[in-house]
Image (spheres, rainbow, N blue to C red):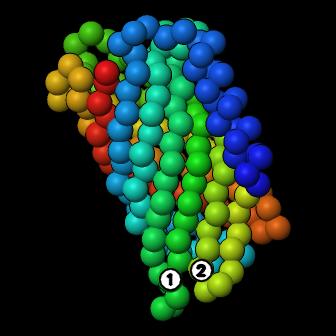
Amino acid sequence: MKKLIGLTLVLFSLGFGFAQPNASSYYAGGLLGIGFPGAAGLSVTTFGLTGYFGASDLLTDNLDVRGGLSFGFGSVAGVSASFFRLAADAIYNIELGPDVPITPHAGGGLRFGRLAGGGEGAGGFGVGFLAGARYPFSAQLSGVAELSFDVYFGQITVTHPALAVGIRYSF
């Protein structure tokens, strides 16, 4: 497990190194959201926090690469539940024109996640898809809203739809 997470981080770091983004194209942000992870017919409502770091316009205009770490907590039928997610995404920004301030985006990538509750756990590696929009408050600070849907494959398949809002700061 440790080797696999380490390998994922190394590959992600190498991707950033080879892509050579512009000096001002890095960003970081946070999202606060509500998710509905479920496994084996049981759905849980979790409230989560995601931190992410990314680079814009890699290899081509409007293509971002972003890595994120998420934690979520909730309960169902009096049993506490928690969720952990490590994500690496490629995101395409859709430019609507010079006079339209909102920038929609869509993408997806690889995931590693774990849903635990009541002494039991499920999850593993998976894929995720996301769609959202960014609205600039200033040249560096933007508001972000996203919908996502992840599927994790392990002994038990876990699905995780979520809705989140947050901020993004561009360096």
Q: How crowded is mark 1: few (under 14 residues within 10 Å), some or many (20 or more)?
A: some
**Is any part of residue 127 visible from this angle?**
no
Question: What label does residue 80 carry, if any?
Answer: 1
Image location (x, y in percent) of residue 110 = 67, 41
Query: Quadrant location of the C terminus?
Result: top left
Q: Is residue 30 left or right of residue 93?
A: left
Q: Compared with residue 163, is residue 82 higher up or lower down, i.e. above or below?
A: below
Query: Picture coordinates of residue 83 (x, y %)?
Result: 55, 65
Q: Up-down: is 79 above or below 106?
A: below
Q: Camera-side residue: 94 or 54? A: 54
Disc 2 crowd rating (10 Å Cα; few below 14, some 14-19, many 20+) is: some
| Viewer-closest of 152 and 66 | 66
- Tag 1 secondary structure: strand
Along the line of sight, which residue is nearer the eye, 116 or 36? Answer: 116
In the rendered structure, which amino acid carries the disc numbered 2? Gly
Q: Do the residues labelled 1 and 2 touch (CB within 8 Å)?
A: yes
| Residue 117 image label | 2
Local SS, label 2: strand
Q: What residue type is labelled 1?
A: Ser
Residue sitting at 59 percent across and 80 percent down? 117
> In percent of the image, x 76 and y 54: which residue is there?
1
The picture places residue 91, in percent across and down from the top left corner, at: 53, 28
* Count of numbered marks: 2
